[in-house]
Amino acid sequence: MSGNTIAAIATAPGKASLCTVRISGDDAFLICERIFKPINESKKVTEMKGYTALFGNFYRKGNEIDQAVALFFRAPKSYTGENVVEISVHGGSAVADLLLKACYEAGAKPAGAGEFTKRAFLNGKMTLTQAEGVMEMINATSAQAVSAARSALEGHLYKRAAAVRDKLLVLAGHISAYTDFPEEAVEAVTDGEVAEILADAEAELKKLMDSYDTGAKIKQGIRTAIVGRPNVGKSTLLNALSGFEKAIVTPIAGTTRDVVEQEVILGGVNLILQDTAGIRHTEDEVEAIGIRRSLDRLSGADLVFCVFDGSEPVTDEDLSLCEKCRGMSAIAIVNKQDLEQQFDRSRIEKYFKKVLFITAKDFYMSKEFENDVLSVLGIENLDVNTGIIVNERQYDAVRTAYNSVKDANYQFKMGQTLDIVGVCIDEALYAVYELTGENVSDEVVEEVFSKFCVGK
Ligand code: GDP
C-alpha cells in the first residue's frame, strides 16, 4: 500500500436517498475490495476497468452493512487524475459514517478540505481558476452565479489571462533579446509595437478587474433598499416582488419600523430586498430609530427602489429623499397608477437613473421591469461566460498585473530604457502566473483549497 489514498463523504450531510463516499489514490481499488463484495462473484474489484460499475454489499468488520454501488475510474481518467472509486449507499449519516470508517480501517486516510480538487489541480486536471470555479459552483445560489461558476470551470477566465500572458511574453522575449544581446542583429521591437501591446494588456486587465465587482454582486446578491415616505406602498411592492406576504401592510403610517429582508431572484440575479421604515419627520423615538436604519440601508445599498405615491403631489420629504439617491443606482418607482395622478415626475427625474410607473397592488414581474433593473445595475448584457474574476485572490493578482503593466506603459512613454520597461513586464507576468496557478506558492494553494469543504 502506498499510503496516499484518501476517502471522504462527497455528498451533503443529513437524510437523503443516496450518500457517496469517494476514495482516491493508488490503492483506491484495493481498499474498495476489502470492504465491498459484488453480487456477481465472478467480478474482481481490483481488475475493474475505468468507467464501470458494480452492484454489491459493503462490509465492516466482517458484517454486511448495506447494499452499495461502486463506480470505478482508472488514473488518469478521473476527477483527481488518480484511481478513484465512488461508493454509493442509502443516504443517512449513520450508514455514511460506517462506510467511511470501513474505508479508513481498510487503509484510506481522511481527506482534507478540498483535497480531491487540490489533487486534480496538482495532477494537471484543471487550472487553479478552474478549481476555484468548482467552489463557486458549490456555493452558487442563483442562475447567474451558476453561469459564472460554470464559465470559470470551463476555463474562460484562464483563457483570458493566458491571452494577456502570451502577449506580454512575446514582448518580454523581444525586449530581453534586444537588451541582452545588442551586438547581435536581433530585430528591434518598434516603439509602436511596444505601445500597442502594453495598451492592449492594460485595457484587458482593467476589464478583468472591473468584472470583479459584477462577480461579487452576482455572488453575494444585490442589496436593494426600498425607501420612501410612509404609506407610498413599499411593503406592498416588497410583497409583490417576493410573491408572498412578508411585510405587514397597513394603511397606518409608520408600521414598518424595522428593516424587513427578503431575497428574490430577478433576471437570474439575487436581489436582497430590504423594506425599510417610511422616511419622514417624526417625534416618535422608536420610529426615529427605524428611520435612521432606513437611511443607513439606503447609503449602503447597491440598488435603491425609491417609491412615491403617484396619487399625491411631490412633497418636501420626497425631495429630500431624492437628494439622498443622487449618484446612486436608484430607480424612482411612482406607485398607485390605478388612482388619479397628481405627481409631477419632472421634479424628481434628474435624481434617478430610471423612473418607472407601477400599481404595486396588482404588480407582476415583467421582462421590461427586469431589464430596467439590470440596466440600472449595468449588467443587462452581462455575459458571465466571457470569464470573470470571482474571488479576492484572483482580484489581487489581476490588480498587481494591471499596476505593473500601467507602470511599464508609463516608463515607456517617459522614454525610459527598454530594460526598465522589461522589469515591469516581468512583474506583470509573475502576477498573471499567480492568477492562473502556473506559479503559485504552496501557501497560496493551501489557502485556496482550505476554503473548500471536505469531500470536494
Ligand atoms: P408603506 O408604508 O410604504 O410600506 O406602504 P404599504 O405597502 O403599507 O401601503 C400603504 C397603503 O397603500 C396600503 O393601504 C396599501 O394597500 C395601499 N397601496 C399600496 N400600493 C397601492 C397601489 O398600487 N394602489 C392603491 N390604490 N393602493 C396601494
Image (cartoon, rainbow, N blue to C red):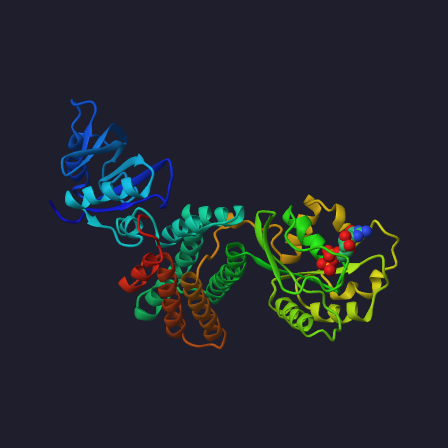
In the rendered image, which quarter is residue 341 located in? bottom right
In the image, residue 282 above or below residue 114: below
Mark yes or no: residue 357 visible.
no
In the rendered image, which quarter is residue 225 located in? bottom right
Q: Nearer the viewer, residue 200 or 232?
A: 232
In the image, residue 73 above or below residue 239: above
Relative side of 111 to 244, left or right: left
In the rendered image, which quarter is residue 322 located in? bottom right
Residue 403 percent coordinates (x, y): 46, 70
Q: Residue at position x 40%, y 54% from top?
A: 162
Residue 451 percent coordinates (x, y): 36, 58
Q: Which quadrant of the figure contains the N terminus?
A: top left
Residue 447 percent coordinates (x, y): 32, 62
Question: Given the current orientation, which residue lies at the most extreme left position?
Answer: 1
Residue 413 percent coordinates (x, y): 50, 74
Q: Residue at position x 66%, y 71% from top?
A: 286
Report ligand 1 position as a quadrant. Answer: bottom right
Q: Residue at position x 75%, y 48% from top?
A: 361
Mark yes or no: residue 87 visible.
yes
Q: Residue at position x 45%, y 53% from top?
A: 160
Q: Nearer the viewer, residue 451 or 90?
A: 90
Relative side of 389 to 44, left or right: right
Q: Nearer the viewer, residue 447 or 93?
A: 93
In the image, residue 99 above or below residue 175: above
